[in-house]
Image (cartoon, coloured by chain):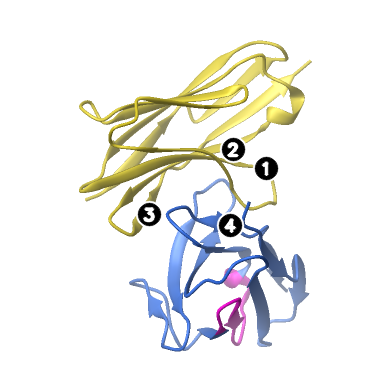
Amino acid sequence: GAVVSQHPSWVICKSGTSVKIECRSLDFQATTMFWYRQFPKQSLMLMATSNEGSKATYEQGVEKDKFLINHASLTLSTLTVTSAHPEDSSFYICSASPAHEQFFGPGTRLTVL
Amino acid sequence: KNQVEQSPQSLIILEGKNCTLQCNYTVSPFSNLRWYKQDTGRGPVSLTIMTFSENTKSNGRYTATLDADTKQSSLHITASQLSDSASYICVVTATSKLTFGTGTRLQVTL
């Protein structure tokens, strides 16, 4: 089956710093990738849709200047959390869809101190 | 507003027992319904995917049903194992938009 990887799997950073999370589709090409955020005991919330070669589409309430998304190739999308604050601490998950099914990455646990 | 509701919110069962998780949705236009298993600290993994015309689909000990008329789905787990302990998420797709349920947290104990 299709495999999606994320790096890093966890990261701890100081408040005010920026953190980059990578999402890769390992065995297929994805023109579209999705970024989700998940708080404890809650479901996944779509943050943005990442489109290869064009600007990302952000969901209502998600600050595009804070969560920078770059989809530079058909196998890589990155999410950069800029000027991170403790309230940004969460589990970030990406997904990609080679056909009609979405495959999720293993997630990245971000903790901002 | 598109919504997916799951019940129960949490469930504890003994190893070897069966259980059934429920999913009710108000999503339109309906494209497909998926069940995912999410282990703690991991991304969701697909168990089943069903389109409008499919009533049931199995994946090993997991069997999903879909009633498109009543907009209900269930996930039945047979002969549960400790490794089944996870959150089970029902996801309904309307065109290209996914609507996630809040999940059922299943704990299988000895």
Sequence-wise, the earlier of marks 2 and 1 is 1
Q: Residues within 10 Å of mark 2 (few under 14, many from 20)?
A: many
- Residue B98 marker: 3
Q: Secondary structure at mark 3?
A: strand
> Which residue has dot 2 on it?
B87
Q: Which residue is mark 1?
A: B39
* First-in-chain label (3 vs 2): 2
Q: Which is closer to the viewer, label 4 or label 1?
A: 4
Q: Magenta includes A105?
A: no
Q: Separation of disc 4 and disc 2 at Cα? A: 15 Å
Residue A104 is tagged as 4
Indicate whether B3 appears above or below B21.
below
Q: Residue at x 65, y 10 (%)?
A: B17
Kind of residue at badge 3: Leu
In the rendered image, residue B56, in percent from the top left (x then y), is placed at 41, 24
Q: In the image, residue A112 lies at what x, y percent? A: 69, 73
Q: To which chain does the residue with label 3 belong? A: B
Horizontal placement of A48 versus B36: left or right? Answer: left
Q: Secondary structure at mark 4?
A: strand
Please report the bounds of the magenta region as a residue range. Answer: A73-88
Q: Nearer the viewer, residue A77 or A92?
A: A77
What's the amino acid at mark 1? Asp
Q: Are marks 4 and 1 on the same chain?
A: no
Mark 2 touching mark 1, by CB under 8 A? yes
The image shows residue A17 at horizontal and vertical percentages of 69, 87
Q: Residue at x 59, y 51 (%)?
A: A40
Residue A81 among magenta residues: yes
Q: Chain of mark 1?
A: B
The residues tagged by marks 1 and 3 sit, at their Cα atoms, a distance apart of 20 Å
